[in-house]
Image: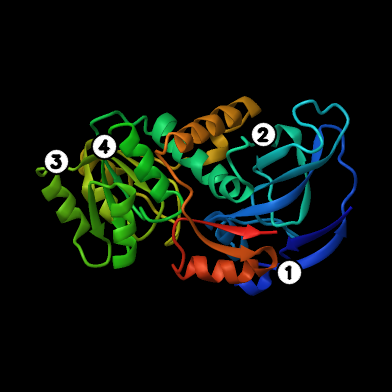
Amino acid sequence: MHARVARLDRTGGPEVIEWHDVDLPPPAPGEVTVRHEAVGLNFIDVYHRNGVYPVTFPAGLGFEAAGVVEAVGEGVVEVAVGDRVGSFTGHRGAYASVRNVDAGDVVKLPDSVDAKTAAALLLKGCTAEFLIERCAKVQAGQIVLVHAAAGGVGHLLVGWLKAIGATVIGTAGTAEKVERVKAAGADHVLHSRDDDVALRVRALTGGVGVPVILDGVGKATWPVSLNCAARRGLIVSYGNASGTIEGVNLGVLAAKGSLFLTRPTLFDYCVTRAEKQASVDRVFAMLAAGAIRPEIGREFPLEDAAEAHRALEAGETFGSNVLVV
């Protein structure tokens, strides 16, 4: 089967993304062939392209996609030809028109969820689920600070947190994004470039600070997060949009109030097929309840992935963004 596949042969800017024609072999035992209709665009794709997260070359890009099963390998019983499915896996290669994936990495899509919505929600939605419910274990009534709250994961975090009864303080980098965070339901929204975020957070919490911080920005917000945390507060650093946090002095955690710090990744929380299915089911339940919405910011043709990366790095996107096949 013919496929168009993105490949990296070196690190660099968006221009290093190259497209190749390949003959895709039939699915091996335990695999399925999925013809993609939409592919999720995530900041981790940028990290693999620019070398923040090292890869072995040649390398594929992308972790999530949605489409239709074209063929199944021996022993596959989870799905059948013609099923609408989404896939998210720790193995790169979703930037492709057709792909063979392990059957354990695919989930069936409800009829109510189209391919673009699924591609926009699988990784980001499951990230929101594990961050809130299994990592930070946020409880109703808690105050949570969400950095980059207008982003692909950020706006889902806001809606999810409000649905479970938390109070949300969000940050955003532009006036337009501030308005989007307000529309998502945040109780308070701070302009990360204009406001003294730590000072404002202390004022909003009576000087106490917040017990939970969800930070997908990284280097630029690390000192802010430290100064916003309540005594024995938890900082969940789940992304590096502004660069990686390096040289963490554990003594600072003590000096700032015996803080807790974790750097989790989705695929340590969605390891087995059962964990993936449970996480996806929870995401779709929150979607059906209206607690979250995909808010697809921009759509790019699949082979315009380089332009999509440029827009993502330039902060020209909001919400979730997809590559359409």
Whole-number angstrom distance, CA of label 1 to CA of label 3: 50 Å
List the residue tagged with mark 2.
108
- Is 158 left, or right, of 15 in this rendering? left
Nearer-N-terminus badge (2/4): 2
How many other residues sit within 10 Å of disc 1, few (<14), some (14-19) or many (≥20)? some
Nearer-N-terminus badge (4/3): 3
Whole-number angstrom distance, CA of label 2 to CA of label 1: 30 Å
Image position, residue 197 (x, y; %):
21, 57
- Camera-near label (4 vs 1) is 1
Nearer-N-terminus badge (1/3): 1
How many other residues sit within 10 Å of disc 3, few (<14), some (14-19) or many (≥20)? some
Nearer-N-terminus badge (2/3): 2
List the residue tagged with mark 1.
18
Whole-number angstrom distance, CA of label 2 to CA of label 3: 45 Å
Mark 3 element type: loop
- Camera-near label (2 vs 1) is 2
In the figure, 120 relative to 289: above or below? below
Observer-nearest of 293 and 311: 293
Nearer-N-terminus badge (2/1): 1
Mark 4 element type: strand
How many other residues sit within 10 Å of disc 2, few (<14), some (14-19) or many (≥20)? some
Image position, residue 33 (x, y; %):
81, 43
Whole-number angstrom distance, CA of label 4 to CA of label 1: 44 Å
Look at label 2 and name its amino acid.
Answer: Lys
- Camera-near label (2 vs 3) is 2
List the residue tagged with mark 4.
233
List the residue tagged with mark 3.
208
